[in-house]
Amino acid sequence: MFHRIGVIGAGDVVSRAYLPAITKRADCMVMAVCSESGRSARELAAHDHIPMVCNDYVELLDCHAIETVFVCTPTHLHREMAAAAMSRRKNVLVEKPICTTYADARYLLQQAKEYSKTFYAAYKNQFREENLWLKSKALSGELGRIEIMDFEWYRTKRYEHKTWLYDPVYSGGGVLMDLGAHLIHIALSLLPSRCTYRAFCQNILRGSASSRVEDTSVALVTVNDRTAISIKLGWDMKLQTKSKVVLQVYGTAGHASNLDYNGPKRDGYEAMVADFLGQIEGGATYGLGLVEDSMLLLDALYRSNESRETISGQFVGVV
């Protein structure tokens, strides 16, 4: 199957990750790229020999030759753009988090169920080799029943050039929404029998005066009243390396960590793009229940931070 692709967004993640992953494939052609001013899109088009440049995403979506769309824009634009793409019967990949709010995410997921084309949320960290290895250990039963997950992710630098990240209207939140979304998605994927949750979170804003989102976050989640998940996050931390990611899983029969993995390590984008295109070729969409539950839990954690109370509820999806 040959994939004719349009990319909405022309920022760093597109130039650094998506275009290299797509253009190296013989079964893909990027037919168009779009950015708000058109300037960054023109630069990418010249570099990667993309024939069509747009500064209006509707123009890209109205190109009938384009069958598959990658939405890689600031988060507040995802609902509008992804819904428009689905209404035109396109296959759609949306960068994580898929929306700034759970309500908007739920709307998109409901739209996805109404259309026959593939809808995909881009949680690329689940495809990193060390995380796939950890997941196989947990789901195989080798660790027994999972009792505790202790996850942490710290970065030395904030994304200073992405000013929209520091306004919750555009981003939906700070480090919890940015890094935490990945860790929540991975944690819930290890609990396919999840039913209920209790969630408590404390977010701290300690960045520049222009920032309105949290820089650090500590969350504690209990699933099914028997599995505890601890998630600790930080931007602009004082580290000896650019990033520190430690995922620890403790079960009744053993323990495993992403740090125990000794094989090759890549960023996950190529494997994720391959998975998305494979779903298109198979004519199906998988994992939307996990996507919805991840957004549901994110929403509960932000509500807990606001109320300073534990938020309880039920999950709605499955893996």
Image (tube, grey):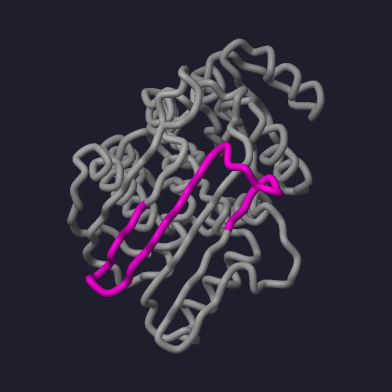
**Residue sitting at the far bottom:** 253
Nearer to the camera, 191 or 35: 191
- Is residue 118 in sight in this rendering? no
Residue 2 within the magenta-colored segment of the rendering: no
Asked where in the image residue 17 lies, by quadrant, the reply is top right
The residue lying at 46 percent from left, 19 percent from top is: 209
Asked where in the image residue 173 lies, by quadrant, the reply is top left
Nearer to the camera, 69 or 126: 126
The residue lying at 39 percent from left, 50 percent from top is: 218
- Is residue 257 in sight in this rendering? yes
The segment highlighted magenta reads 219-245
188 relative position to 68: left or right: left
Nearer to the camera, 62 or 126: 126
Q: Quadrant of the C terminus?
A: bottom left
112 relative position to 66: left or right: left
The residue lying at 72 percent from left, 61 percent from top is: 265
Q: Residue 280, image x and y in percent?
A: 54, 52
The residue lying at 60 percent from left, 25 percent from top is: 160
Q: Residue 310, image x and y in percent?
A: 20, 52
Q: Residue 253, image x and y in percent?
A: 45, 89
Residue 243 within the magenta-colored segment of the rendering: yes
Indicate whether 160 appears above or below 181. above
